[in-house]
Amino acid sequence: MTQTLDLTGKKGLVVGIANDQSIAYGCAKHCRAYGADLAVTYLNEKADKWVRPLAEGLGASLVLPCDVREPGQLEATFAAIEKEWGRLDFVIHSIAYADKDDLHGRVTDCSQDGFALAMDVSCHSFIRMAKLAEPLMTDGGCLMTVTFYGSRKVVEHYNVMGPVKAALETATKYMAHELGPKGIRVLALSPGPLKTRAASGIDRFDELMEQAAAKAPTHQLATIDDCGSMAAFLVSDLARAVTGTTIFIDGGYHIVG
């Protein structure tokens, strides 16, 4: 039986678009191209001027402020979705943050507050989204986050984000186990190094990109469109048997990195 990728009628929330080079934007663009209706968030008023034109270009039904550090904003996002749609089919979580001093320093030297902040924004926010999405996913759904190979192997200069992303991947597995009986799948995308705004905060990131391209079997880095096409497939019914795993989109870098 031949099936084609079709997201028509599916409702999805995309969190983490900063500009047109964001992984989240690549995911949103491809999901929309296959017919999904989208709700898009922006971090704050400063980000609004960059994100809103992209959201409008995607025909997003909702464009909402969402800083997970601000009390009530994440809850307000899901309340708006419930009011507008009454349900939700997928969530794409593509946000991470660490203070510069903690990100550029040794894990050994990371401050308690800095570690807690990085873990809260980069990992626990995904757990919070899952909890808020669960009652809206009455017919099942897909929760997706974004991780990096530095969660599994030591990557120079990735520092505190390594253990934070490791926690994120483990949370993905546990939530997949817990939510699976409700038809809710939980997944992590793991692109290789990409030139995004978030990645620019990592020290000597250009060197990491060059090394990754040289080592990868394809000798090419992934793009946000590579991430987007995979995300669209994974939120579709074609991937209904896929959950609890990390999907690498890195030209094979993870097998030799």
Image (cartoon, rainbow, N blue to C red):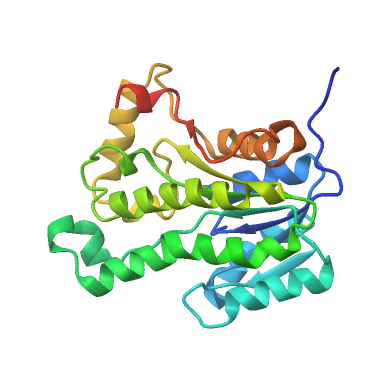
Residue at image point 81% right, 49% down: 10
Residue 166 in percent (x, y) is at 35, 48
Residue 6 in percent (x, y) is at 82, 36
Q: In the picture provided, is 253 more to the left or to the right than 233?
A: left
Residue 234 sits in quarter: top right
The residue nearer to you, when weighing 75 against 157, is 75
Residue at image point 39% right, 19% down: 219
In which quadrant will I find the C terminus? top left
Q: In the picture provided, is 20 more to the left or to the right than 3?
A: left
Residue at image point 77% right, 41% down: 33
Residue at image point 60% right, 65% down: 131
In which quadrant will I find the N terminus? top right
Residue 134 sits in quarter: bottom right
Q: Is residue 21 in view?
A: no
Furthest residue toward bottom: 71
Vertical side of 57 occupied by 215: above or below: above
Q: In the picture provided, is 207 more to the left or to the right than 191?
A: left
The residue nearer to you, when weighing 255 against 61, is 255
Q: How many marks?
A: 0
Q: Is residue 113 in view?
A: yes
Residue 182 in percent (x, y) is at 70, 51
Vertical side of 227 occupied by 40: above or below: below
Residue 203 in percent (x, y) is at 24, 51
